[in-house]
Amino acid sequence: MQDQKNKYFFDLEGYQSGSLFLNLTILHFIDKNSMKLIKEKSTRELNIHIITGLYSNDDYHISGVDRNYQNIFEIIFNPDYTIYEYKIHKMFLRVSKLNAYKYPASKESIFLDDMSYIYLIGVIWKKFCIPSNDILKKLLAGDREDLKEFVPLLI
């Protein structure tokens, strides 16, 4: 959930309808004052699969992380919440300074600072989301130990 001056933005990911599991996200636009639902929007036609991080720049502009397609997206809405413009940017986040290995785990959160830097946090299950031993052996010692001990902040 992200909030702005007049609106809340919620995303419901991977929801179930009867016995069918739908692997997509539904965006919900909520009026902050009345707490009424303004609109629901599926991300299917935008080619956005599962949103794991959502950031709102203002009442009509959101950015987020698509975990499954490993993209960062930006959507600008018209006042009626139809889409004015959207962009998708492919992520290639490296495991180490060597730049040869892609970070394997999900990206779960997104934050944009006032200088337009984007920060992503990897999945917090260190036990399950550490690169394989084959990759760890090839990394610099400091990178290898950091990946074992800490949850990555990816910039």
Image (cartoon, rainbow, N blue to C red):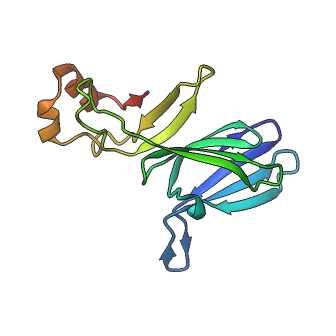
Picture quadrant of residue 153: top left
The residue closer to the viewer here, 3 or 77, is 77
Count of numbered marks: 0
- Quick check: 59 left or right of 26? right
Up-down relation of residue 40 to residue 90 (above or below)? below
The correct choice, above or below, for 121 with respect to 21 in the image is: above
Outermost residue toward the right?
34
Residue at the spot x=36%, y=32% of the render?
151
Coordinates of residue 109 in the picture (x, y in percent): 50, 39
In the image, 89: left or right of 101?
right
At 50% across and 80% down in the image, what residue appears? 19
Q: Is residue 124 above or below residue 83?
A: above
Quarter holding residue 136: top left
Determine the residue positioned at 28% across, 32% down. Answer: 95
In the image, is 53 to the left or to the right of 27?
left
User: What residue appears at the point 23 percent right and 33 percent down from the top-left corner?
Assistant: 100
Q: Quadrant of the N terminus?
A: top right
- Is 101 located above or below residue 47 in the figure? above
Q: Residue furthest bottom?
A: 19
Q: What is the x, y in percent for residue 144?
A: 20, 27
Quadrant of the image for the C terminus? top left
Judged left or right of residue 59, residue 49 is left
Where's residue 127, x and y in %? Answer: 27, 42
Which residue occupies the foreground of this view, 17 or 77?
77
